[in-house]
Image (cartoon, helix red, strand yellow):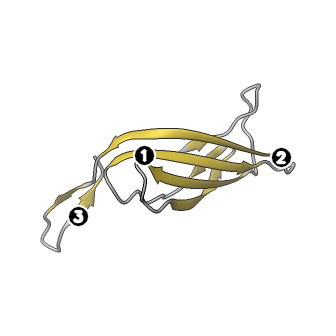
Amino acid sequence: MLRLTDDSGTAVKGARLRLEGNMSHPGMTPVFADAQEIEPGRYGSNMVLSMAGDWVILVYATLPDGRKFERQFEIKDLQPPKSVEHSSGPIRTKT
């Protein structure tokens, strides 16, 4: 979940967000996803980060008036989801 606000803290509605995920070590292919506005100023995405480890997420944003900006944040020590057995097969659970 990403929250987008202006300098006064007001939610920014109608922006377009593109996400790029990169592992912190070289040689991995980047992962891309779009974020959708789920309520005013809040954007969600299902980005599949395929490996455990450290990730850098780049956010490319286009505001409703056409201005663009970029931000980045890190996810440290991402762990793979755990599996539990169920009668119909494995179920993936979030940790």
Please tell me whether mark 2 sits on a helix, a strand or a loop. Answer: loop
Please tell me whether mark 3 sits on a helix, a strand or a loop. Answer: strand
Position of 52 with respect to 28 (left or right) is left
Judge depth for marks 2 and 3 and give the one in front.
2
Q: Distance between the residues labelled 2 and 1?
A: 29 Å
Q: In this view, does 73 lie above or below 27?
A: above
Q: What percent of the width, then of the height, locates residue 42?
A: 62, 44
- The amino acid type of the residue labelled 2 equals Arg
Q: In the image as oriented, which residue stretches furthest toward the right? A: 65
Judge depth for marks 2 and 1 and give the one in front.
1
Q: Residues within 10 Å of mark 3 (few under 14, many from 20)?
A: few
- Where does label 3 land, which residue? 91
Q: Distance between the residues labelled 2 and 3?
A: 43 Å
Please tell me whether mark 1 sits on a helix, a strand or a loop. Answer: loop
- Where does label 1 land, which residue? 24
Q: What percent of the width, then of the height, locates residue 14?
A: 76, 51
- The amino acid type of the residue labelled 3 equals Ile
N-term mark: 1 or 3: 1
Tell me which residue sits at (28%, 47%) in the image: 79
N-term mark: 2 or 1: 1
1 and 3 marks in contact (CB < 8 Å): no
- Where does label 2 land, which residue? 67
Q: In the image as oriented, which residue stretches furthest toward the top? A: 8
Position of 52 with respect to 27 (left or right) is left
Q: How far apart are marks 1 and 3 (CA)?
A: 29 Å
Q: Residues within 10 Å of mark 2 (few under 14, many from 20)?
A: few
Judge depth for marks 1 and 3 and give the one in front.
1
- The amino acid type of the residue labelled 1 equals Ser
Q: In the image as oriented, which residue stretches furthest toward the front? A: 26
Task: Judge by depth and name the residue closer to the eye, 76 or 5.
Answer: 76
Position of 18 with respect to 79 (left or right) is right
